[in-house]
Image: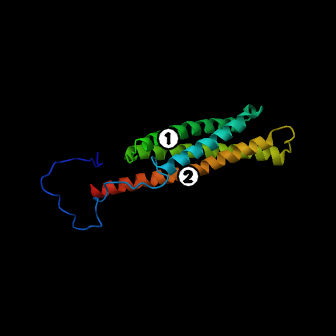
Amino acid sequence: MFASRPVVHPMEVAAPAPANPAQQQPAGVLMKDLPGMPGTPSGLALRVTQFLLATVSLAVMSSTSDFASVTAFCYLIAAAILQCVWSLSVAIVDIYALLVKRCLRNRRLVALFAIGDGITCGVIFSGACAAAGITVLINGDLQMCSENHCASFQTAVSMAFMCSFSLTPSFVLNFWSTAFAYSRVAAAG
């Protein structure tokens, strides 16, 4: 593995000062802690926001009596459940990292978060798009809102869209840091 590990060697002589004071760390050894990354307070806030939006979408859609008759609504329910589980599990990891005051700089872990964010973002966005299409069909084309729960459907769809939009910063930051870390390691090695 190409990650740096802290090693302590007792020295009786003072360590030499670096030749260039601007370069304290060797290039390509540490990843930066950007706001929104896993293990930061803003990353935890993003995960909690994603969890709450997916939970509201799930609760509103499942509170209607006729959601099970439409496949797109069932798909949105499944996507919201997946998003709730993913966001809650990553939020628990973030809380642990914040409690022990440890940064999550492991390349494999950040790559796993990037892949998971990308998959869940695609799934919740496609579920929201499918449910939005059916909602527009019921509301605008068929004019059947008096028989259905159009306001509930629209609320659930809008929460799912907001959830997918709140996932985008997490995915972009994790993907960027993973790509940046791999490119720095490849350049150093």
Return the x and y of residue 166 as percentages of the image width and height: 59, 50
Tell me the crowding category of disc 1: few under 14, some 14 to 19, or many 20 or more residues within 10 angstroms, Cα based. Answer: many
Quarter of the image for residue 144 reads top right
Tell me which colouring the rendered structure shows. Answer: rainbow
For this rendering, which residue is in front, 123 or 152? 152
Q: What secondary structure is found at the residue carrying circle 2?
A: helix
Q: Residue at x 64, y 44 (%)?
A: 53
Asked whether residue 20 appears in the rendered view, the answer is yes
110 with respect to 1 (left or right)? right
In the image, is 180 to the left or to the right of 132?
A: left
Q: In which quarter of the image is the N terminus?
A: top left
Based on the displayed image, in which of its 4 quarters is residue 64 positioned? top right
Q: Residue at x 74, y 35 (%)?
A: 70
| Residue 90: numbered disc | 1
Identify the residue at image location x=36%, y=53%.
Answer: 182
Which part of the image, by quadrant, shows the C terminus?
Answer: bottom left
Helix, strand or loop at mark 1: helix
Residue drawn 68% across and 35% down? 74
Q: What residue type is labelled 2?
A: Thr
